[in-house]
Image (tube, rainbow, N blue to C red):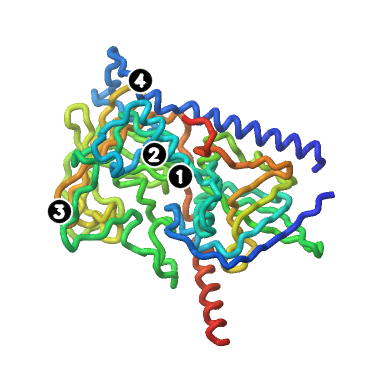
Amino acid sequence: MRHAILTIAVGGLLMGPATARAHHAFTAEFDANQPIQLRGIVTKVELINPHSWIHIDVTGDNGEVTNWAIEGGTPNTLFRQGVTQGSLPPGVEVIVDGYRAIDGSFRANGRDITLTDGRKIFIGGSSPGAPTQ
Amino acid sequence: MSDPEVQMHCRRIACLLAMGIAATLTIPPAFAQTPADPDWTVPRTPDGRPELQGLWSYATITPLERPADLADKEFFTEEEARAWEDERLREMNMDRRDGTAAQDVSRAYNDFWWDRGNSVVSTLRTSLVIDPPDGRIPLRVPGGRGRGFGGLAGLGGRYDGPEDRPLAERCILLGSGGAPMVPTFYNNNVQLFQTGDHVVLVNEMIHDARIVPLTPRSGLPEDIRLWLGDSQGYWDGDTLVVETTHFNDRRSYQGAAENLHLTERFTRTGEDTLLYQFTIDDPTVYTRPWTVEIPLWRNHDLMYEYACHEGNEALAGVLAGARAREAAAAEEEDR
């Protein structure tokens, strides 16, 4: 039996300089003061534009299950790299390190998504050590 | 799902990720650097024009302007290019966790989701700007528009409603798709279609289609202004030239907006290469015209949809974040 955990750490961190240019301002949607770690079971993967969403069921210490939505990037990049809707099927357990939405809803950005054995998923591209084109 | 099933799926993910890495290997810019085939001739359409059709990529990490530390260097050597790429890819890497919390949030998701390309342009130029010769955007006229990418409408500092937000957040325009087209974080692909009297440029970023007539027409009235401008195409020998004016004043490229006269040139240079150049001419903003060059390479993959509006939950999230911050500030004030 898997025991999912939910940890929210709130720190008095200062806002940094300009954000990376992207479809939208991440710092306007997610709170740098609310780093979060979620461990849960994938329930649905939405490969939609402009941003994909991975939904996971997280069981709190009191046994209550909450469905969280984790924001990703455009699915087009994933399709080109061979990832499909079935690549992360319901039932897989993942650990998400990210930041919670400012409005307090059960949404977060997924800075790192890892499998429970420690392997990172959705990592590559221009990461150091990744093959160049 | 049982643990063995999970392991199987996990292996499948790893396999697919490995396949993904292999897929990126199928589109090497190095290919574009191979010397031109002396026997290659421009393929032509039935009416004798150069064949430009297909899916072309403009992904590159070459900067728009030449970095200051490369001021006297117009071209890299191969060795310099590889070293510069390594350094730049390390800087841009979204998986690094060495910044502030705000930087960490802005890095948003792993590098896997980004598709900027991993290489400099095949010509090994140190900047996309080729004129002025110093590779830098020329000086602006005093009082001209500020530099910018995403447009003038919605400068991003207010959150009262969707109209306050930048064009990209509203899925109206993501400037990289054109016009002109410039490399960005993903979706750097354009598909060209040709008939005897029209060319259509469908951009993967926000799936805008520019329909360019090749037969001369009378221009639009001055007061008709368009997000993508009004384009007229013609052939200059084997080069397709597209001139675009009548942009509206709510979008811009590097500050050039309603007075921009954009000239784009497309020239086949090889079986899998198409040279793209554009000139920005806006005397109300810049002291002189300037020109960008990007060698496009054929993308043998598919064009994918980018239905930005359909799934744009982020805009609601941004506005909800602003309301939450206002409520927190009001609560703080009441104490």
> How many C-alpha atoms fall within 10 Å of the one at disc 3: few (<14), some, or many (≥20)?
some
Amino acid type at circle 1 is Met
User: Which residue is labeled 3 in the image?
Assistant: B283
Q: How far apart are marks 1 and 2 (CA)?
A: 10 Å
Between discs 4 and 2, the one toward the N terminus: 4
Q: Distance between the residues labelled 3 and 2?
A: 29 Å
Between discs 4 and 1, the one toward the N terminus: 4
Q: Distance between the residues labelled 4 and 1?
A: 27 Å
In the rendered view, would you say B90 is above or below B40?
below
Residue B1 in picture, x, y percent from top left: 80, 43
Query: What is the residue that sits farthest to the top in this orientation?
Result: B39
- Which residue lies at the image location 35% right of the left edge and 50% below the top edge? B175
Task: Say which of marks 4 and 1 sits in front.
Answer: 1
Amino acid type at circle 4 is Thr
Mark 2 lies on a secondary structure that is: loop
Between discs 1 and 2, the one toward the N terminus: 2
> How many C-alpha atoms fall within 10 Å of the one at disc 4: few (<14), some, or many (≥20)?
few
User: Which residue is labeled 2 in the image?
Assistant: B61
Q: Do labels 1 and 2 touch, CB within 8 Å?
A: yes
- Which residue lies at the image location 42% right of the left edge and 30% below the top edge? B299
Query: What is the residue that sits farthest to the front in this orientation?
Result: B69
Residue B180 located left or right of residue A77: left
Q: Mark 2 lies on which chain?
A: B
User: Which residue is labeled 4 in the image?
Assistant: B34
Task: Say which of marks 3 and 2 sits in front.
Answer: 2
Which mark, by number, is residue A15? Answer: none
Q: Nearer the viewer, residue B284 or B167?
A: B284
User: Which residue is labeled 1 in the image?
Assistant: B92
Q: Are marks 3 and 2 on the same chain?
A: yes
